[in-house]
Structure formats: structure tokens, C-alpha cells
Image (cartoon, coloured by chain):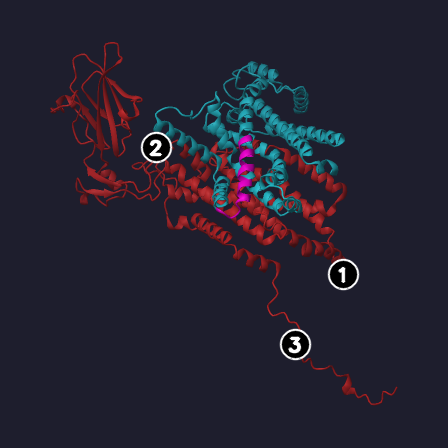
Chain colours: A cyan, B red
Amino acid sequence: MLKYFAKRIFLGLVTIWFIASATFFGMHAVPGDPLAGDKAMTAQIRANLEAKYGLDQPLGTQYLIYLGNIAQGDFGISFTQENRRVNDIIREHFPISATLGILAIVFAGLGGVLWGALTALYRNRWPDVVIMFLVILGISVPSFVVAAISQWSLVGLNLATGTAVLPIGGWGTVWHMLVPALVLGLSTMAYLTRLMRSSMLEVVSTDYIRTAKAKGLPATQIFSRHQLRNAILPVVTVLGPAIAGITTGGFVVEIVFAIPGLGRYFVQAIQQLDYTVIMGTTVFYGAFLVFMVILVDLVYGFIDPRVRVEK
Amino acid sequence: MSTSHLTPADFQPLQSSVSGQQISRPSLSYWADAWRRLQDNPRAMASMGLIAFLLAFVSVGPYLWQVDPSVQDLDQIGIGPGADRSVTLAPPFQPWLPEQQSTILADNAMGLTLTMPATTQAVRLMWARADGVRYRLYRNLFDPSDTGSFGLPLAELDRSYFEDRLDLQAGTYFYSLVMLDANGAETATAITRTVNVTRVISVAEAVERGLIKTEAEAQLGQELRLAWHPLGTDYLGRDMLARLMYGGQVSLFIGIFAPLAFVLLGVIYGSVAGFLGGATDQAMMRFADFVVALPFLLFMILFKVIFGIGPGESGIWPMLVAMIILLWPAPARLVRGQILQIREEGYVSASRLLGGTTSYVVGRHMLPNTLGVILVTMTFQVPSAIFTEAFLSFIGMGVAPPTPSWGAMCNEGIKSMLTRPHELMFPALLISITVLAFNLLGDGLRDALDARMRGTE
């Protein structure tokens, strides 16, 4: 077990190296020049700036310096925001994205399990039909449209009641987080609901459920002890990739709801060709996702002992 | 034992008197069976109809609705579907000389009066000015007494008249005049006047736009009809229907061709890895694992930056190439798994035993048996490709303006969502319908083609 995870972590590190290298060489293939703006006015200033950012070195040397810095957790200085370190940008803005993401995952996970179980229990009756219709809607409508419509309804709600029931944007209190997190988690919730439903339907027809029924266990106990616990396993497996989807999907929600998260900074950095910020955030996100997937696998081993035996 | 009484006639085969079991219907091939099952699925058939309609909308549509999607109709900017398009012929705009005009002022508190019927050429206001007093004038689309705020002022004046010519559209405006005190602060003395602006056009303009043929047949006060926009126009006055058709070409092109290309690449990669097996397979799959680990949207954006978009380019090809580079591993893994499984099947061994060459075994047995899974994957990749295009265009990283795409149109429409919802709703609706149709078709195909996944939903 330990050996297995040591191997996973080693492979994860290699993956991060791959991501970092792909980002580095990708960014250096970008046409244009980070100093092409109005910064480098004379050759002397330009030479000084190049020396400051290490751009006067050969590409191979730059690559080694870059890898060495990343190994020490240093992503460099922003090109457009004077004297602001990329580490500081990540430290300030990532917690906001993470809070939003965690809340969205909680919404999606709880909602998905709950609705999925409900549809399976009421199979082919009206709760099933209604929820599955909403699920298909949730999968088919792009997130930015959902975000826009929900913000629009918030405006309407606030106008109708005459007071600010919920803020329509910004960040600060729990009230700011509710609607964006819900919007962010919606498509994942829809996906998890579908998954949970099919997994529940599979469990219902297994032998151990029949045994439990034959033993005369009450329906509530069969549901909570046997059905739910076994049906939840596939949902946990896809949580890793779902976290990936939610962190990157955060871009749209952060832009629409004016939330100062890391996603918004990434989009801004791309638009301003801020090399260090782009590279730093990409490597950071990549590393985050790689370890999230490993973490989910670890958790999965605790929930489902069979996995541990197999590996 | 004597055999002499046997004659050659005894060695003739007997006439079969009983017709044994017979196959009464033609045998169904795998594909015919799948097609029959698909036809039994009303949701899949409906979604196929929808997809056919959407394809016709973007391919045949532009021939039926021949409006240039980049032409601006400056008389009708941002109008909704079914908006009033009547216009009155009026004399050309004449400069206003308010000092020479004698007007009977209205008997409201400040005497705020329209000096002539308000038209899209100009709104001319006069009021009774107290000596030495300054005023602030506001123009609103909604009644300021409802919203409780005047918004941004139109002008600050120390005279008793104002001519408004700023971007006037046909409709209702609320003009508010507020008296200022000596310090320039607003006082409670204010009046709001509702002004109905009618759309007018001069004869020369009408001829230029082709509304009438010659100046000779024009009569002042005559009602004309402006160009028809069934779904309204966008914020630059471009026809929404035409833009939706051309935008759909971009969205559906990326949505269908990107999955086609990267699934094909994945099939080749995966089948080679699966067939060769061993260390080659391990190395190839490790590489695929690395590519899977790249954060998709981040690298999608990075690739867009790396390829760059030159002036006059639409940015469709860079997006397509980036998707192919990033998305091939998933189908590759799937196909490899399938090939590994099928390689051990009895019918493959049987085919080899009977002398089937490698290319025969792969082409006749292995690929056809994975084709169902490949087809289902491809169908499910279409919605995600369409979403990706829409998302990238939405954050301004997708196709470059003025090329329309549904995602880019949503991006433009979201800015004026509150006042002109149709600019967001139509492209969003089309994206949703397309994604829905392909998802339902994918479900149907999976049920029809893949026996193992059947009924799992």
C-alpha cells in the first residue's frame, strides 16, 4: 500500500515536471516579447531588465534556473505588476478560489448523492422524471449562461424585495459565496446525480440487498446502511476529476460574479502576456490537480477495502 | 451377408420430406441490429432530427436568409425580435436657433416643454429659467421615480434650452431637470417629463438605404418599413439570425471536426499501443498519462497564446489543433483497453489459426468490434468540444471578432443582458439545444451499440 503510493507520488512529481516543461517551452514559443511594451525605452534599460528577469541567458540555462526555482517553490516576479511576486498572488487569491471550489464540491456532492438516491427510489415516477429533466438541463446549459441568468434573477429578487437579499457580486461574507458556489457546482451535481442514479439501480438488484430484505431489516436501514454506502463508491471515484473541472470552471463564475480569485488573475495575465504569472499559475494548478487525484485515490482505499487488496 | 440385392438406386439421396428448422427472416448484421434498436428509441430519433435541423440551419440557412452577418443596420441597433420597424419620412435635420423661437412653456413646475415633436433626429427642450440658476439634465430609459436614482447627467446648463441628439432610438425616454443651488448641489426642485421619440428618416437617407427608389416618389410624413430582422439585431446593429447561422457554422465545425480528428488520432495511437503491447505499450501509455494530467483549459488557453492570431484570422484552426493535441489520450486509452481485451478473444485466435494475416485480423475483427465504443465516445465528445469553444470565446480567448460563433455571441450578449436579453438568449439556446441533442444521441447510441453498457444510463 505504502509502496503503491510512493510510486504514485513519484509519478505525480514526474507529471508536474512534464507540465512545467511544457509550459516553459510553450511560453517561450509565444511570438512577441514581454519587454516589448513601453518599459524598455533604451538599450541600457532593456539590458538591465533582461538581466533582472534572467532573459539574457541562453534558453537551456533559463530552463535550468526555472526548474531550480520551481523546486524551491519560487515562481518569480510578475512582469506587469511591479515588484509583486507570483507566490504572493497565488497566496492571496488562491484561498478565495479554493473556498469557492470546496463549497461548490460540497453542494455538488451532497446534491448529487441526494437527488441520485431520490431518483432511484422513485424510479419512473414523477420525482424521477422531474429531477432527470433538470439534470439534462444542467448538463446542457453552458455554465456562463447559468451564471448570467442566476445573477439576473438576483437583481430581480433584490429589486422585488427592495433590499439586498443576496449580493449580486463581489466577495467577503458567506452570502457572497452561496450563489456562485451553487452555479459552479451545478453541472457537476447534474453529472453526479446521473452517476448516483445508475449506481443505486445497480445496487438495488444485488444479492446482499435481497438478503437484507429477507432478514427483515426495515427499509430505512437497508437504504442507509447497504444501498447508499455501496452506491456512493463510483461517486467518490469521479470526485478527483470533478475537482479539476470545478477549479478551472471557476474562471467563468469568478468573472461573472466579480470574485477576486486566481482564475480571474490567470485570464488577466494571459491577456497582458504576463509570462511569470501564466507559468506560475499553470504549474501551480497542475500540481494541485495531480495531488488531488492521488488524494482521492487514497481516500478511496479507505472507503472501499477491496481496492487496497487489489493493488 | 449378401450384398447382391443392392442396386445403385439405393445410393441416391432421399428426398427430404420434412422441412426442418429454417431461418425465416434475413439475418441481421450488427449494424442493422443497432440501427433497429436506435429506431425504437424515440429520444434518440428526436435528437437525430434536431441535429439534422441544426445542420440544415447553419448550412442551408444562409442561402435562404441572404443577409450579410457583418453588415450593420445603424437605424436598428440592439432591437429585439418583432420590434416596431416603421419609420416616418421627415425633412433633413435643421439647426436649431432657440433664441429666435417663441414657445409657450408648459404649466408644470419648471415649465419643461418640448418645442417640437421628439424624433430620432433631435429632442428639443425648453424651460422657464430663474435668473442665475444652473440646472442639471438627465435622460433615463426607466422612470427615475421608480428606480430612485437619476444616473449620470446628460448636461449641466446655465441656460433655458437643450437640444439632445445623442444616440436617440425610437422609444420612451424620461428627461429629468434638476435645479442646482449656489454651491452646485442638487435641490429638491426637479421635474421629470416622459418623451416619446418617433423614428424619422430623411428622403436622402431613405433612398440610400433602398427603402424608396427615387426622391421623386417620396412624400413627407409617409410611413416606411425598415429592413426586417426576425430575431432582432445585436449591439452593433448586425442581424442576429444571419449571425446565428454563420456562428453555428464555426461552433458546429469545431464541435464535430475536433472530436473526429482527436478520436481518430487516439484510435491509431491506442490500437498501435494495444497491439504491440509490452514495453512499447507501457511507454506510450505513460506519455498519454502525462498529457491527460495537463490542466485542459489552462493549456487550451496557453496554446491559443502560443499559436497567436494574426490580423484577419478567425482563430478557428489554432483552437482545433490545440484540442487535438490535448484530447487524444482519452480515446487512445479506451481503444487500447478494448484491443487488449479483444486480442485474447477466441474468435481472434480462430482467425489466426485459419491463417488470417495481422492486417486482416485487425481490420476485420478488432477495429469493427471497437467501432461501437469509438462512435459512442465521439458522440459524447461533441458537446464537450462545443462547450470548450463557447467557454474560450466567452472569456475572449476563442475565435477572434468579427467572426461570429455562438460562444462569442454569448460573450457580447452578456454585457447588455438586462436591457437586451435576446442577444444572450438566442445563442445560449442554440448551444443548449445542440449539446442536449448530442447527449441524447450519445445515450441512444450507447444503448444500441454496446451490449455491456446497456441499461446503465
As measured in the structure, the alpha-carbon distance from the residue carrying label 2 to the one carrying label 1 is 73 Å
Chain identifier of the residue bearing label 3 in the image:
B
Range covered by the magenta-colored residues: A106-125
Residue type indicated by callout 3: Ser
Q: Is residue B74 above or below residue A287?
A: below
- Residue named by callout 1: B354
Q: Where's residue B400, x and y in %?
A: 47, 35
Magenta stretch contains residue A122? yes
Q: Quadrant of residue A10?
A: top right
In the image, is B385 to the left or to the right of B53?
right
Nearest-to-viewer mark from 2 and 1: 2
Q: Which residue is pictured at 76% across the width and 43% down the height?
A: B278
| Residue most extreme to the front | A216
Question: Main SS of the magenta segment?
Answer: helix
Q: Which residue is pictured at 81% across the width and 88% down the height?
A: B6
Magenta stretch contains residue B129? no
Q: Where's residue B164, x and y in %?
A: 24, 26
Structural crowding at the residue carrying mark 2, measured as other residues with C-alpha within 10 Å and reported as few (<14), some (14–19) or many (≥20): few
| Residue most extreme to the bottom | B5
**Are discs 1 and 3 less than 8 Å apart at CB?**
no
Asked whether B36 or A201 is in front, the reply is: A201
As measured in the structure, the alpha-carbon distance from the residue carrying label 3 to the one carrying label 2 is 78 Å
Chain identifier of the residue bearing label 2 in the image:
B
**Residue A311 appearing in the image:** no
Residue type indicated by callout 1: Leu
- Residue named by callout 2: B419
Mark 1 secondary-structure assignment: loop
- Residue named by callout 3: B19
**Residue B355 appearing in the image:** yes
Q: Where's residue B252, x and y in %?
A: 49, 44
